[in-house]
Image: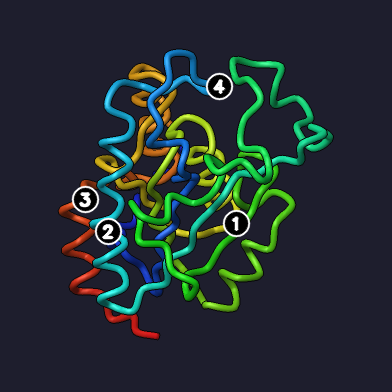
């Protein structure tokens, strides 16, 4: 049997970027029958990402917004509507826009538009990360069990250090949220981090633009 040794990793290894996953205007619109199921307290949880955004900017850490968007003729949904989700995030729908007011979205921020769950799939996300020389992805947003999880997995498989800010993500249900967090921790020990831990790590980070 091969002895397995876990290397003790810092919360931020090398250069970090804050990845704000799908915090769009619709996240803050209350609906009786939403197109995508949300766990209780979803809006309140993702709203906390603003604290991380403000801190990242203060310390010169790039903020990268991810936006899910689909064409009105539905041609790019693929198998996405075969599950629990209904039609959502259509182009030209105000609810599809980044939640600019809540997140203080700025023209100087980076924006990646995606057609599928992972921010890596069919986008120039990795080109941007390489250009910025990023090593650690700090993930917030939603859904924990869908777009955050799949982006985390692709980041992990591309050898990025991936951290998920537990206070600032929300899932389709509490059960799915918890399971996704456990799955991410399984892939990278220490992946699950509190907002306070991340803020402290940003403060201590040596990264500057």
Mark 3 or mark 4: whose residue is earlier in sequence: 4
Q: CA distance from mark 1 to mark 3?
A: 24 Å
Write the residue at 35% across / 61% down.
Answer: 104
Determine whether label 3 and label 4 are within 8 Å by CB: no
Q: CA distance from mark 4 to mark 2?
A: 28 Å
Residue 111 is left or right of residue 76, and the answer is left
* Residue of label 2: 52
Q: Secondary structure at mark 4?
A: loop
Disc 3 packing (10 Å; few <14; some 14–19; many ≥20): some
Which mark's residue is nearer the viewer, 2 or 1? 2
Write the residue at 56% across / 69% down.
Answer: 129
- Expressed as whole percent of the image width and height from the top left, the position of residue 86 reads 63, 20
Q: Quadrant for the C terminus, please.
A: bottom left
Q: Secondary structure at mark 1?
A: loop
- Expressed as whole percent of the image width and height from the top left, the position of residue 103 reads 35, 55
* Residue of label 1: 158
Q: CA distance from mark 3 to mark 4?
A: 28 Å
Residue 80 found in image quarter: top right
Residue 130 is left or right of residue 8, and the answer is right
Q: Secondary structure at mark 3?
A: helix
* Residue of label 3: 195
* Residue of label 4: 35
Write the residue at 43% across / 69% down.
Answer: 106
Disc 1 packing (10 Å; few <14; some 14–19; many ≥20): few
Give above or below for 132 relative to 21: below
Mark 1 or mark 4: whose residue is earlier in sequence: 4
């Amino acid at each position: 049997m091969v002895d397995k040794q876990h290397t003790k990793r810092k919360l931020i290894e090398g250069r970090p970027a804050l990845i704000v996953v799908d915090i769009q205007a619709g996240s803050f619109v209350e609906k009786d029958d939403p197109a995508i199921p949300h766990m209780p307290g979803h809006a309140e949880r993702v709203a906390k990402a603003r604290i991380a955004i403000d801190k990242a900017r203060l310390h010169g850490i790039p903020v990268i917004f991810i936006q899910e968007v689909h064409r009105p003729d539905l041609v790019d949904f693929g198998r996405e509507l075969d599950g629990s989700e209904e039609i959502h995030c259509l182009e030209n729908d105000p609810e599809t826009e980044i939640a600019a007011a809540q997140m203080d979205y700025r023209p100087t921020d980076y924006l990646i538009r995606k057609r599928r769950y992972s921010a890596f799939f069919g986008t120039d996300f990795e080109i941007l990360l390489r250009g910025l020389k990023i090593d650690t992805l700090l993930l917030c947003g939603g859904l924990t069990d869908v777009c955050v999880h799949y982006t985390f997995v692709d980041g992990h498989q591309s050898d990025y250090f991936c951290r998920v800010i537990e206070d600032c993500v929300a899932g389709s249900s509490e059960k799915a949220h918890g399971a996704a967090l456990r799955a991410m921790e399984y892939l990278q020990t220490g992946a699950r981090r509190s907002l306070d831990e991340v803020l402290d790590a940003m403060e201590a980070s040596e990264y500057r633009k």
